[in-house]
Image (tube, rainbow, N blue to C red):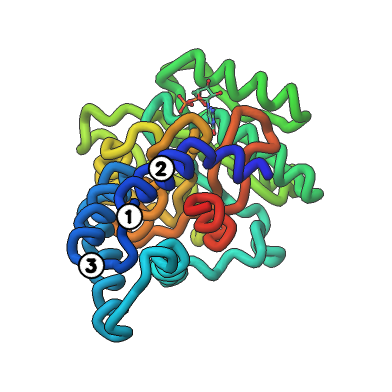
Amino acid sequence: KDLEQGLEKTRNSFLHRLGKAIAGRSTVDDEVLDELEEVLLTSDVGVETTLKIIDRIKLRVAKDKYLGTNELNTILKEEIAALLSEKKDQFDQEIPLDVKPFVVLVVGVNGVGKTTTIGKLAARYKKLGKNVVLGAGDTFRAAAIDQLVSWGERIGVPVIKQQMGSDPASVAYDTVQAALNRNADVAIIDTAGRLHNKIHLMNELSKIRKVIQKVIPEAPHEVFLVIDASTGQNAFEQARQFSQATQVTSLVVTKLDGTAKGGVVIGVSDQLNIPVKYIGVGEGTEHLQPFDKHAFVESFFG
Ligand code: GDP
């Protein structure tokens, strides 16, 4: 229900435009496909992924010789679910039982909802019975540290921090150590979200990784890139830059509730070949949901 509400804007806008595109037409012909292409592009699915989807539908039209416009929505759902399924089946277990502490590094540009996502994740894992430790690794902004501390207080989870301006790698080290000492199940580490200097970002993230690996050689076990769906094409660019700077293992797509650009989820995951693990559909802790492609496709295409 939250998912349906969260995707309402995307769905309404998509269905409205699709409806206009096929109004008065009974078969999916080249003109309908051109209109569909336009609708997918304006839903921020992105050029490459849109063309891929259109090609797949063309193949089906060619194979079946005929496709009624009344079937178009069903076919779209199937094709897009197939596209998403190629990369994301490994999430039966949110936190593996045999890895302790499970170390999660969270990256993303300022303002995308990184801190909020960490708070929501901590609340979620705690509810699953896990002991969680947070690391205030965005030492560049005092507000980021304060915000994480207040999340920690709110949900009853310890936050490892140093003063503003200290070395983020040192905070990451302390956090992993603290997680080990406390026998915690999960450590979630925040990072700074400045993107004006790519080399700097790369160096900082690789230093954080190295330092974490001094404590636990296999860590970080997850690197979540948080992207804001409402930024549309910017989200593609950010995802590209971060995945060049470090090894991103999963995406968290936030603010799907505030936008009609939900197609970003499909495009970014497809183009960067990174699975989506969670989506944010509101500001409350309950508004972070594990990504389920079938539920998503149903909510997106009505
Ligand atoms: P950060 O700078 O990346 O750490 O961003 P914040 O976590 O401070 O979030 C920025 C704003 O986005 C805050 O007002 C959050 O409440 C809001 N926000 C985060 N995730 C979501 C979401 O999924 N939906 C909505 N509507 N707002 C969100």
First of labels 1, 3 by sequence position: 1
* Residue density around tag 2, few if under 14, some if 14–19, many if 20 or more, within 10 Å: few
Q: Quadrant of residue 260?
A: top left
The amino acid beneath tag 3 is Asp
Q: Residue at x 44, y 59 (%)?
A: 275
Do the numbered discs 1 and 2 sit on residues whose CB atoms are within 8 Å? no
Image spot of residue 287 (x, y percent): 64, 37
* Residue density around tag 3, few if under 14, some if 14–19, many if 20 or more, within 10 Å: some
The amino acid beneath tag 1 is Gly
Q: Which residue corresponds to mark 2?
A: 16
- Is label 1 within 8 A of ligand 1 (CB to nearest ligand atom)? no
Q: Residue at x 20, y 38 (%)?
A: 199
> Relative to the observer, which residue lies in front, 5 or 154?
5
Under circle 1, the secondary element is loop
Label annotation for residue 241: none
First of labels 2, 3 by sequence position: 2
Q: Residue at x 22, y 61 (%)?
A: 51
Question: Gap in Å between the C-alphas at discs 2 and 3?
Answer: 19 Å
Q: Which residue corresponds to mark 1?
A: 24
Q: Quadrant of residue 211?
A: top left
Asked whether, in this view, residue 84 is left or right of residue 42, the answer is right
In the displayed structure, 91 sits above or below 215; it is below
Image spot of residue 87 (x, y percent): 43, 68
Q: Which residue corresponds to mark 3?
A: 29
First of labels 1, 2 by sequence position: 2
> Relative to the observer, which residue lies in front, 57 or 153?
57
The amino acid beneath tag 2 is His
Under circle 2, the secondary element is helix
